Image (cartoon, grey):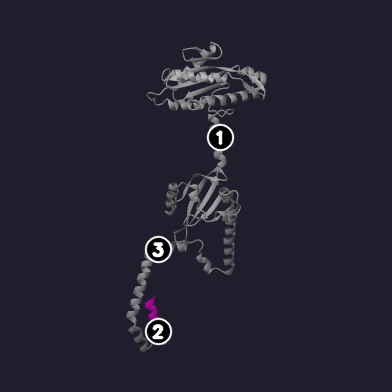
Amino acid sequence: MIVADGILFPLLAFGVHSDTFELIIGNFSGKVLIACSYGLFLFAFLLFSRHRMEKVVKEPLLDWNLLLSSGKEIVEQMDRHEQQLRQAKTVFETSREGIAILNLDFAIVDANNALVKMVNPLSDDTSSILHDKLLERFLPPETGNRVQQLLKSGQSWSGEINWSSAEMRRYGLLNLVPVTDRIGSISHYTLSLTEVSELVHTREELRFLANHDVLTALPNRRQLHTVLARDLRPFSAGICKALLIIDLDNFKQINDSFGHVAGDELLLDFTHRISFTILGKGTLYRIGGDEFAIWTHSISSIKEALDLAEAVREEAIKPFRVNNDELVRVNCCIGISAYPHHAKEVKSIYQQADTALYWAKELGKMRISPRCEIIAA
């Protein structure tokens, strides 16, 4: 093109005669040199930046046909783009999902009101979290660094997170996506956060109720069997533990005479007393209506388990106050099974303690039985 331009332009400007040809021929080598130099750089640019040229040509925002359109078509196209922008803005501002735009330093440059409420419920001002690096608040340092490296490489990341807000623990699903410009370079990151705190709290509550008694909040029979299976497998040499099953006497009569509310008060009072008595020695479980169990942490002998049972019985025979001023008395029977003396597996140790309790009750109230030996209290 440069060479052709250098030949045609003088001919058109000065006409066809000998002086013009002399001018063209005299500068022909220079024109060829300039054309080759320019062509070389153009060829190199197209060779190494072909993908960039293709992206620019295919860029949706760059409508090449629009350059050849009429004024009416241009206005219509601009109206459509403006409408799309308004729709996107409406979704951004009214979404219940927290949304933010992060710069290359992972600091917030724009955010919607939903995200502000999640992060800072006491503020309605979006500017209160601008320039805040939320990833440092949402993720531990090691995880945060790994996520940032992943995003810088052009990959997305999502996961469950938790954070502190308004003196409570909140939970959410975080999604991070890199945004590229028309030449493929990362220019921003989008952050979207869906809060699932209510779902997590409900899940934790159901898990708690599945393993604990509703009235006393003590671990229940299911949790006791889980703990027994964990503590007895594998067997550890030199460890002695004991399972005590406690049955309250006269509890049905109290329920019938004073009502279930009074019975609940008695059970709560009994729970507090026994929990304090066995503090540091074992864990208390409620395994039935008026049945409790104690799984000792570690004992040196069966005598130590008997001493603990005696301390529990002494607390049980003390008067209980119900309906604010009524004093009532109960007592209890206790069955004991020790590991490894009486049983070496979960099913056996529970069955032995239950059998010992049955024998104690057969002999009368206020009895303690270590499996086979019946001791009068």
Q: Nearer the viewer, residue 168 or 53?
A: 168
The type of residue carrying mark 2 is Pro
Q: CA distance from mark 2 to mark 1?
A: 91 Å
Of mark 2 and mark 1, the one earlier in the sequence is: 2
Mark 2 or 1: the one toward you: 1
Identify which residue is drawn at 38% across, 81% down.
Answer: 7
Label 2: element kind: helix
Q: Which residue is mark 3?
A: 50
Question: Where residue 230 appears, x then y in whole percent?
Answer: 44, 28
- Residue 157 lies, with reference to residue 207, above or below; the image says below
The type of residue carrying mark 1 is Glu
Q: Nearer the viewer, residue 250 or 191?
A: 250
Side of 228 relative to 257 (left or right): left
Question: Where residue 309 appears, x then y in whole percent?
Answer: 50, 19
Check residue 11 for magenta coloring. yes
Q: Which residue is mark 2?
A: 10
Of mark 3 and mark 2, the one earlier in the sequence is: 2
Mark 3 or 2: the one toward you: 3
The type of residue carrying mark 3 is Arg
Q: Residues within 10 Å of mark 2 (few under 14, many from 20)?
A: some
Label 1: element kind: helix
Identify which residue is drawn at 55% across, 33% down.
Answer: 206
Label 3: element kind: helix
**The label number, if any, that marks residue 205 in the structure image:** 1
Dots 2 and 1: beta carbons under 8 Å? no
Of mark 3 and mark 1, the one earlier in the sequence is: 3
**Where does the magenta region start and end?**
1-12
Q: CA distance from mark 3 to mark 2?
A: 35 Å
Side of 154 relative to 291 (left or right): left
Q: CA distance from mark 3 to mark 1?
A: 59 Å
Q: Is any atom of residue 351 visible in this view?
A: no
Dots 3 and 2: beta carbons under 8 Å? no
